Image (cartoon, helix red, strand yellow):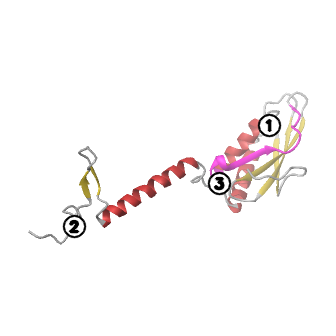
Amino acid sequence: MSHDREHPDDDRVFVRSNWGTNRYVYNARNPVGRVLIVGSLLFAAGGLYAMSHPDLFRGGWDGDDLRTAVTGATTQLSRERTGPGTDTGLYADILTQDIARHGQGPQDALTVTLASDPPESTIWYGGTEDADFSVRARGTDTAFCLHVHAVQRPKATGYDAVDFTVDDGSCPGETTGAP
């Protein structure tokens, strides 16, 4: 009986392992088996790369979407009369959440920071609270400066009016740095 092939297992994609186990392995003598071996190695290398770079698949923002989201969020916060108060860290979080809700980019790609001195509380004496917040997002060089102007009556629990001015670019005196 004559065989045209060197080895009887050349035509099978999977063969039994010769290393003392009874498992099936890719057959390196078969062209499809070689492709599967190389593909498995590339898949494993890609998986390790993706695990070591967690930001790889996180999206960013584009400038137009960030502009639309900032405009929508500030309009809503003005209507709701949500002002900065004395906890500007909490207000930065509120701004971040509302901007993310009005846009298409991920919330963790947004950076909203206080770019002015914290406002003094007007809850006891009434008056105005003013603060500037810088808005930046990963994926775009677009930046905005939000100036918040809130008016409150003495001993009132809410604000009478909250107005925003949105300027393109960094806030005055702010150091530029991408998130």
Q: Earlier in the sequence, mark 2 or mark 1?
A: 2
Give how far across and how far down residue 27 sits, in percent.
29, 59
Q: Nearer the viewer, residue 28 or 138?
A: 28
- Residue at image mark 3: 103
Disc 2 crowd rating (10 Å Cα; few below 14, some 14-19, many 20+) is few
For this orientation, the residue located farthest to the bottom is: 4
Q: Pointers 3 and 2 in contact (CB under 8 A)?
A: no
How far is the residue under mark 2 from the one under mark 1? 77 Å
Q: Is residue 11 left or right of residue 166?
A: left
Q: Residue at x 82, y 39 (%)?
A: 160
Q: Which residue is mark 2?
A: 6
Instruction: Report the magenta residues as a range.
Output: 101-122
In the picture, measured across the screen, residue 4 lies left or right of residue 110, that is left
Task: Please give the residue where the numbered disc 1 appears in the rendered image.
Answer: 88
Compared with 62, 92 (above or below) is: above
The amino acid on which the numbered mark 2 sits, given as a three-letter code, is Glu
